[in-house]
Amino acid sequence: MKKIKILSPMLALAILFVAASCGNGGTSGDAPETPYHINMAVLPGPSALGALWLMDAARAEETQNSYDIRVLGTPEEVVPLIVQGAVDIAAVPTNMASVLHNNPNVDVTMLALSTMGVLHVIDTTGEIADMADLAGRTVHLSGYGAAPQFAFNYVLRQNGLEPDVDVELIFQAEMPQIAALMAEGIAEIALLPEPFATTVTMQNENARHALDLTQEWNRVQPDYGLVMTAIIVRSEFLAQHPDAVGIFMSEFEQSINFINNNVSEAAALAVDFGVIPNEAIAAAAIPRSNQVFITGERMRNYTRGYLGVLYAQAPASIGGALPDEAFYFIP
């Protein structure tokens, strides 16, 4: 039985309302069709990059399954669509996947991990070469109480630096504010995700990528990665259409491989589908976005480790507890 609290009362209320209005939300249970039509949701930026080839191939009707892939604005927009059954598969922050699984009104399964860390320390001083150089400095970032903060805290502590003691953290409401502060010379150092990190460096000649937080994470924690995006499926859909999900897994892996091996073409697709607004920024950001396709036991082990880091700092950020075994799709 699931009995775990979720991240926020507002999210809980939304889920309960939609669940009550949808009833069972299932299909008749007839034999699954293969191939099948799949509704998928992705988010702008790194979580959508891996789906670009799939979006393009589906548009040209060159995939085995047929797909309707929507680029939504925020992770919170995905939740009611999953509850309603309007979205079958989604790319969401890994900790949100855990929050959803731990909610008794939502039943989702993790299929794969699709991005490692996308966070970078951007520096305008020219003085930051390793984590130790952050001692005594001020770092601007967005998203207080969110996964990027907890990942950064972990890496700082593993390097002997205590957040808000050895390194001052200043949170801004939105990332464009950080860019403006850096352009004005008020903010010298920032923690930013791709593609925003690349956007700042292209707009500010004094800004540069100083540290890749994924590499810094791997230095202090080689056993599991900084896994920031997960592919989840409605568990009911997986049970009813396992063959279609299997085809999706194969086609999505092909999509990830295409993005990593054809950056210029992927950059054009990123602009075409509204994932990143500028082709030059997309071409520079894609290699720094750590697109991966990790499944099975490695997915489970990486996810457990990553969620454990978040749980130690803020249990509510993953839904109150580490997910049970039913969360992970292990063929």
Image (cartoon, helix red, strand yellow):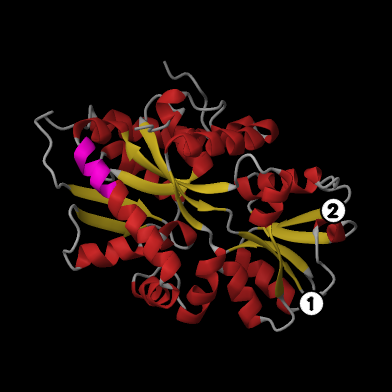
Residue at 32%, 40% in the rendered image: 82
Q: Main secondary structure of the magenta part?
A: helix
Instruction: Write down the residue under mark 2.
Output: 167
Q: Amino acid at mark 2?
A: Val
In this rendering, the answer to whether 322 lies above or below 80 is above
> Under tag 2, what secondary structure?
loop
Residue 126: x and y, percent?
Answer: 82, 75
> Under tag 1, what secondary structure?
loop
Task: Give the left or right position of residue 139, taking residue 110 as reference.
Answer: right
Point out the image quarter for the C terminus.
Answer: top left
Packing grade of label 1 (10 A; few <14, some 14-19, many >=20) is few
Residue 228: x and y, percent?
Answer: 54, 48
Label 1, label 2: how far apart the Cα atoms are = 19 Å
Residue 244: in magenta span: yes
Instruction: Write down the residue under mark 1.
Output: 185
Residue at 47%, 23% in the rendered image: 324
Farthest-out residue, top:
1
Q: Amino acid at mark 1?
A: Gly
Answer with mark 1 or mark 2, whichever residue precedes in sequence.
Answer: 2
Question: Does residue 84 appear in this view?
Answer: yes
Q: Which residues are magenta?
A: 242-248
Q: Quadrant of residue 193?
A: bottom right
Packing grade of label 2 (10 A; few <14, some 14-19, many >=20) is some
In this rendering, the answer to whether 147 lies above or below 181 is above
Residue 214: x and y, percent?
Answer: 64, 54
Point out the image quarter for the N terminus.
Answer: top left
Foreground pick, 177 / 293:
293
